[in-house]
Amino acid sequence: MHMSRSDISASIHPHGGNDRQSGFTMIELIMVIVILGVLSVFAAPRLLNTGDFNARGFHDETLSLLRYAQKAAIAQRRVVCVSLNPTGVTFTIDTNSPPDGICDTDLAPPSTPSGGSGLSGSIPAFQYSGLGGTNQTTAVKVTIANTTDITVEAATGYVHD
């Protein structure tokens, strides 16, 4: 049996193409490399910088602890004293009977705080009353680096950011 040249070509290339190989062109590969380079310049430092994540975690923890102190004051109908320092928040409670407004016993938080840094050290200590308000005449502003401020309203003790 005699095969023509076109029959031989069809048997080698069943889809009728020529000898061209499939794959990515050089331009496509260069564009992928350029895009990866741009992403690594802008996205990688943002993703690898844990400082912002830690600051936000410390912010949320402080917000939660301040709310806990207010709820403890209301639940126990006692004065809770709040002290802020650059690495966290501590609480004491008035356990005297009758209550005299002098905090004399440590109040443990519901879980061990992980702490952090960046809390403004210029915030004066304040107290929550048994009704939930504070002993301050104006709102207390708590500043943590790289996050939004936390505000404790004076009259109501409402904690928000």
Image (cartoon, helix red, strand yellow):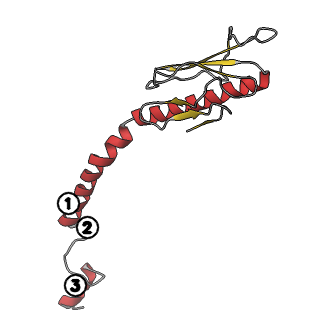
Where residue 145 sits, quadrant-wise, is top left
Q: Which one is closest to the eye, mark 3 or mark 2?
A: 2
* Badge 1 element: helix
* Badge 2 element: loop
- Residue drawn 30% across the image and 48% down it: 42
Tell me the amino acid under the disc marked 1: Ile
- Residue drawn 57% across the image and 22% down it: 113
> Mark number for residue 8?
3
Judging by the rendered image, the residue that carries numbered circle 1 is: 30
Q: Which one is closest to the eye, mark 1 or mark 3?
A: 1
- Residue drawn 71% across the image and 13% down it: 101
Residue furthest to the right in view is 98
Compared to residue 112, the image places residue 47 above or below, namely below
Tell me the amino acid under the disc marked 3: Ile
**Nearer to the camera, 53 or 77:** 77
Horizontally, is 3 left or right of 117 in the view?
left
Query: CA–CA distance between discs 3 and 2?
Result: 25 Å
Tell me the amino acid under the disc marked 2: Gly
* Badge 3 element: helix
